[in-house]
Image (cartoon, rainbow, N blue to C red):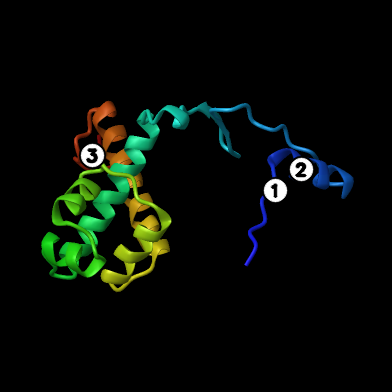
Amino acid sequence: MALLSVSAHAVDMATTKAGSTQHPTPQKGTHVDNHSAHTDDHSTGRVTKEDATHRKLFGDAIRRTRLARGLSQEELAHKSGMDRSYMGRIERGEQALSIDKIWHVADALDTDPSRLFAISLEIDAMEREREQDEREGFHGIDLGTDV
């Protein structure tokens, strides 16, 4: 089975020839998405603050799902084919996961990867709301409309 390798330049050229809008090709180390552009230095192995946040959120999602299933960290690690210490690093957000490992963990939790990502996003939204409340001085107190 042969693998197909296409450069970003070739994709841009094909897209332009097909009449689609051409998007700028990001420079090495720059990630461009629909929301913003930011610089990552993945080639050196340095973890950006955003990467660390994503890892922590995903680890929290795994931990919460594991606890909801009544599994110990050791049981989840065994079912996933991983070492318990490795699973601990994942749950603490210290370890990035390959797509293969994400699938293994999701299977062991009897869920699918999209659910783990959805839980990560839910945790992120709750944390952002809590931080906003703290900045505004509410600390979770419902002040109502009578204030």
Say how many tags the image has: 3
Residue at the (42%, 27%) spot, across then down: 44
Q: Name the residue type under label 3.
A: Leu
Q: Nearer the viewer, mark 1 or mark 3?
A: 1
Q: Which residue is mark 3?
A: 143
Residue 16 spot, x, y in % from top left: 84, 42
Q: Which quadrant is home to the C terminus?
A: top left
Residue at the (39%, 57%) spot, across then down: 118
Please tell me whether residue 71 is drawn above or below residue 9 in the rendered image.
Answer: below
Q: Callout 1: helix, strand or loop?
A: loop
Q: Callout 2: helix, strand or loop?
A: helix
Q: Which mark is residue 10?
A: 2
Residue 145 spot, x, y in % from top left: 30, 41
Q: Quadrant of residue 113?
A: bottom left
**82 vs 146, nearest the viewer:** 82
Label 3 neighbourhood size at 10 Å, few (<14), some (14-19), many (20+)? few
Residue 54 spot, x, y in % from top left: 36, 42
Q: Name the residue type under label 2.
A: Ala
Taking the view exactly as shown, the residue that stands out farthest to the bottom is 110
Taking the view exactly as shown, the residue that stands out farthest to the front is 1
Please tell me whether residue 92 is drawn above or below residue 25 in the rendered image.
Answer: below
Q: Name the residue type under label 1.
A: Val
Q: Quadrant of residue 79?
A: bottom left
Determine whether label 1 and label 2 are within 8 Å by CB: yes
Residue 90 spot, x, y in % from top left: 24, 49
In space, the residues marked 1 and 3 are separated at their CA atoms by 57 Å
Q: Quick check: 40 left or right of 123?
A: right
**134 vs 54, nearest the viewer:** 54
Q: Which mark is residue 6?
A: 1
